[in-house]
Image (cartoon, rainbow, N blue to C red):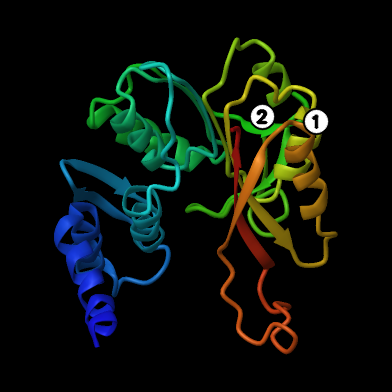
Amino acid sequence: MKTLLKEIVKPIYYYIKNKNLREFYKLYDRYGKFGRYVEVKDVKFLSYSFDVPDVMSFIWQFKEIFVEEIYKFNSDSDSPIIYDCGANIGMSCLYFKKLYPNSKIKAFEADPKLVKTLRKNLAKNRILEGIEIIDKAVWIDYNGVEFSVEGADAGSIYGSRNKIKVASIRLKDFLETEERIDMLKIDIEGAEYEVLKDCKNSLNKVKNLFVEYHSWNKTDQKLSEILKIFEENGFRYYIENLTKRKTPFVNKGELGDMDLQLNIFGIRR
């Protein structure tokens, strides 16, 4: 009975103690009925205000970044070097700046619409200092890349709709200019394998590596090769499955764009 009571009380206690969780429920209560791709100006949360192109994806971004704190990391420096590949509308940049106010961030975002929102959100919340916004796709060369503009959080080189060509940078070249990189976050909607493969000999200065892995239907799965790159560079990895699919032998994930999505955390001990 005691064990049962503990299990009942635990989430209530967590709710009371965690102000960010309470904020998430407020956001969900206010905007959860809106559905996807509803643009909302001046969404207020904590002590900030963001313009958001898709309020539902924003709510879940807030939960992942501020409640679950998936990007939290320790640093010996009070001004860590952070590469935010896939900066979207600025939620991750905001979190990193709250965590380390003196951090130096390179924020890469390929979607032209999201770049405008990113700049506006960071400027109006006065968190632009120490952040360099690079409005190009993270890629393996400088030749540009075909990119499917989604307008929220899922623009990808593998999309088939609303394709445009965007300018690109070679991430490997950027990494090799740094003496250290305290956090390398790669959330680039399907381009992660090609980029990691190109950078595999340039990750020795990276202390913490986050990769969101996307397995797109009708393409080969590259998870084993990505994990091999982690291993060869001395990272131990922790994997979180974002794809909740019951009875996977029956529900094979063939109906959506992706059949698997993972968060992979690369940790040096």
Q: Name the quadrant containing residue 105.
A: top left
Q: Residue furthest front?
A: 2
Could you say which is closer to the camera, residue 106 or residue 184? 184
Secondary structure, mark 2, is loop
Q: Amino acid at mark 1?
A: Asp
Quarter holding the N terminus? bottom left
Q: Amino acid at mark 2?
A: Ala
Question: What residue sits 70% from the left and 43% below the top?
Answer: 192
Q: Name the quadrant containing residue 161.
A: bottom right
Horizontal side, residue 203 vs residue 15: left or right:
right
Instruction: List x then y, in percent, for residue 187.
Output: 58, 44
Count residues near mark 2 (Cα–Cα under 10 Å), then give few for <14, some for 14-19, many for 20+. some
Instruction: List x then y, in percent, for residue 174.
Output: 65, 18
Question: What residue sits 52% from the left and 38% below the top?
Answer: 112
Q: Can residue 18 be seen by looking at this rendering?
A: yes
Label 2, label 1: how far apart the Cα atoms are: 18 Å
- Identify the mark at residue 198; answer none if there is no mark: 1
Horizontal side, residue 127 vs residue 220: left or right:
left
Q: Is residue 213 above or below residue 31?
A: above
Q: Name the quadrant containing residue 171.
A: top right
Secondary structure, mark 1, is helix
